[in-house]
Amino acid sequence: MANDTLPQNHLANTIQALKSGLTSIPLSAAMDNTEAWQQEFLQSGIPALQDIAREIGNLQSLLTAPKIDGPAVGRALSLLGSQTTQFAFQAEAGQQADVRSIGDLLLRLGSDLQAQPA
């Protein structure tokens, strides 16, 4: 991943999936999406992205637990949203808006889940 450039088609697909809402994303598709991002970020050599990759691993663990804890998933999504929004300032100029959009969507979805009873 050169010059902090993220895969454009992956950005667009992730934005569309998040805009559709969490319940519209099959768990298998969510796992595939998070796995692809995690691998991309781990191999980036960029500390901020590697931190995001570790939180993605936490989210994956929460999503594969025998009983999904909505508020815990919400907290993980909110943290990912914060990390993603912060990384937007380091992203390639042409991708900053998309990265911020993903961060904002993650924050909103995380907040919604945290507000629900466990």
Image (tube, rainbow, N blue to C red):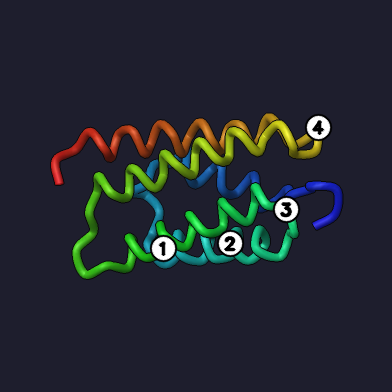
Residue at far right of view? 3
The residue that mark 3 highlights is 46
The residue that mark 4 highlights is 93
State which tag comes first along the sequence, 4 or 3.
3
1 w.r.t. 76: above or below: below
Residue at the image position 80 percent from the left and 33 percent from the top: 94
Q: What's the amino acid at mark 2?
A: Gln
The residue that mark 2 highlights is 38
Residue at the image position 15 percent from the left and 47 percent from the top: 118
Mark-to-mark CA distance, 2 and 4: 22 Å
Q: Are marks 2 and 4 in contact (CB under 8 Å)?
A: no
- Image-based side of 101 in relation to 64, left or right: right
Name the secondary structure under disc 1: helix
Mark-to-mark CA distance, 4 and 3: 17 Å
Q: Are marks 2 and 1 in contact (CB under 8 Å)?
A: yes
Mark-to-mark CA distance, 2 and 1: 10 Å
State which tag comes first along the sequence, 2 or 3.
2
Residue at the image position 49 percent from the left and 44 percent from the top: 80
- Image-based side of 52 in relation to 88, left or right: left
Quadrant occupied by the N terminus: bottom right
Residue at the image position 38 percent from the left and 60 percent from the top: 26
Task: Give the number of the mark in front: 1 or 3.
Answer: 3
Task: Give the number of the mark in front: 2 or 3.
Answer: 3
Residue at far left of view? 117
State which tag comes first along the sequence, 1 or 3.
3
Q: What's the amino acid at mark 1?
A: Gln
How dense is the environment of label 4, judged by Cα within 10 Å: few (below 14), some, or many (20 and up)? Answer: few
Where's residue 111, x and y in %? 33, 33
The residue that mark 1 highlights is 60
Task: Give the number of the mark in front: 4 or 3.
Answer: 3
